[in-house]
Amino acid sequence: MPIRLCSSSETRAQLLREAGIAFIQESVEFDEESIAASSPKNFVYQATVGKYEANLKAYGFEDYPLLVADTVVTSQNQILRKAKCKDDARNILMTQSGNITSIITCLIYHAKDKKIVDISKTDYLFADFDADDLESYLESGRWRGKAGACMVEGFCKSYIKEVRGYESTAMGLSVEVLQRFM
């Protein structure tokens, strides 16, 4: 039986496809701007619960198990949200350049026989970003819609000096954790 991926993220959909997990993708949006959180972990948990409650109300979990996820990027004690413009993206990325960036993903999986809530983290130590490479990435617009303007599978990949955790967690869905419960 497929699961219902309650996310418009093509990256999350791709992770499920690559893991061989059948799914349908549809989602009710949730406004994260109203969240007041004291820490990145608390923020991502609140955002995931908000998305879960909105999608549970719309779809339930009787027909298909419900899967909801959210991701937050943090570096230098700052929550790095989705950039609003190119200058914002530049500032967010410069916060990560030469530093440790943590990507925290929360997921809620709710089937008839079980409900799982997981918060996983992947840490990246990045080398300093090359100024010309950064400007080229900013011009490409590929940072749009990405938490922390970060693409560990794209722009940031060549700057990774060290990784602790799963790449799937950093890409927005901890597939290795999910698979243990399915």
Image (spheres, grey):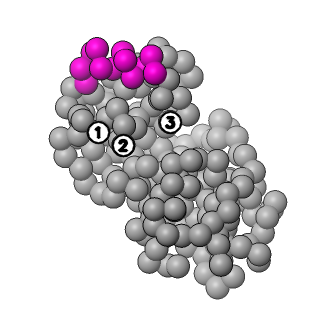
Segment colored magenta: 129-140
CA distance separating discs 3 and 1: 15 Å
Q: Which residue occupies the foreground of this view, 36 or 142?
A: 142
Magenta-span inclusion, residue 119: no
Which residue corresponds to mark 1? 157
The picture places residue 136, in percent across and down from the top left corner, at 37, 18
The picture places residue 175, in percent across and down from the top left corner, at 45, 64
Residue type indicated by callout 2: Glu
Residue type indicated by callout 3: Lys
Which residue corresponds to mark 3? 146
Nearer mark to the viewer, of 3 and 1: 1
Which numbered dot is residue 96?
Answer: none
The picture places residue 34, in percent across and down from the top left corner, at 68, 38
Q: Please determine whether, in this image, residue 59 is positioned above or below residue 104.
A: below
Which residue corresponds to mark 2? 153
The picture places residue 124, in percent across and down from the top left corner, at 27, 44
Describe the element under mark 3 as helix, strand or loop.
loop
Describe the element under mark 2 as helix, strand or loop.
loop
CA distance separating discs 2 and 3: 12 Å
Left or right? Give the position of 177 relative to 156.
right
Residue type indicated by callout 1: Lys
